[in-house]
Image: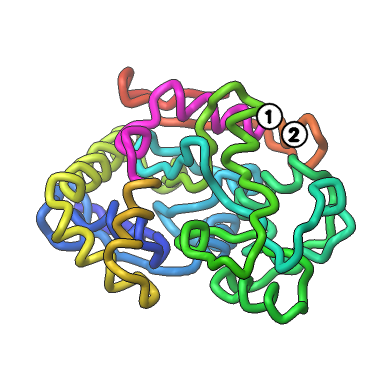
Amino acid sequence: MKHVTLGHTPDADDAFMFYGIASGNVDSPYFQIEHVIEDIEKLNKRAIAHELDITAVSAHAYAFIKNYVILSSGGSFGINYGPVVISKKNIELSDLPKCKIGIPGKMTSANLLLNLAVGKFDGVEMIFSEIPKYVLSGVIDAGLIIHEAQISFGNEFHRILDLGQWWHHITNGMPVPLGINVISNRNLSTKEIIDFDELFRSSIKYGLEHLDDALDYAMRFGRGNSKSLIEKFVKMYVNDLTISMGEEGKNSILTLLQKAKSNNIISYDEILLVDSNSQKIQKY
């Protein structure tokens, strides 16, 4: 049995996906799993340092990491919705590049999407949960919000830009890729990578089949939000593409990274993805 380190965030959708494995209801004769729970930007940095065998990362961060393969299971895709830019006053979209905007991390997919949408801007890295507070206090002009805050911010804010809707429009309906899970092809063989992808897919399916129990588990990481809000958020980001991204999810990831590369925001040599149909690792 192989010992592997598995990094994921304390966010409700991640916790929900891993409930089957974490609860012991979905297990494998091949892996002994050590769970490592960190904020997404910390996981991005740990992936760059190649400290974890398997980890959740931002789709944006994949451009900065080496020797990892994107799993076909476990992706978080927004379907005509995604990270939102909010402000205390109604700012014109064309004025956003002049604004000081709170961001949840430079390597987050939300930050990449905003960069693609408006060009360069003055981004200030902050803990994502504190961004609305700093918008209200006037420390920043606008905030880029992710996670449950996307659906729970109050009437005191103006919605300036929904990046999921923006992406949906410019790509003729593609889902927006936000979070992905990657696995080391330095530390694990191709067979082990395929085996873990299947294990993770089984965990996601188990959570969906045991919704109440999985939501109760996710609530432990719910940051004080109500179960109804957590359920709404989970159902937004744990969908059919999470079980297996297929061609639709794969093409959205490739499109995001290719657009960023052509705009000289990132560079990368290759993209490696697990193809669940062929049971192979594909290179792009």
Question: Can you tell which quarter of the image residue 76 is in?
Answer: top left
Q: Is residue 192 left or right of residue 129?
A: left
Residue occupying the point 39% across, 68% down? 37
Residue 240 position within the rendered picture, expressed as x and y whole percent measured from the top left: 32, 33
Tell me residue 15's x, y (percent): 31, 60
Q: Which of the pair 168/63 is nearer the observer?
A: 168
Q: Determine whether the residue tagged by mark 1 lies in a helix, strand or loop.
A: helix
Q: Badge 1, how many Cα within 10 Å: few under 14, some, many 20+? A: some
Specify the segment rendered in magenta.
237-257
List the residue tagged with mark 2. 261
Indicate the amino acid at tag 1.
Gln
Would you identify the image quadrant in which residue 243 lies? top left
Q: Nearer the viewer, residue 1 or 256?
A: 256
Evaluate if marks 2 and 1 touch, with contact meaning CB atoms under 8 Å apart: yes
**Disc 1 target residue:** 258
Q: Rounded to the nearest whole Å, what is the CA distance between mark 2 and mark 1?
A: 5 Å
Q: Which amino acid does label 2 sit on?
A: Lys
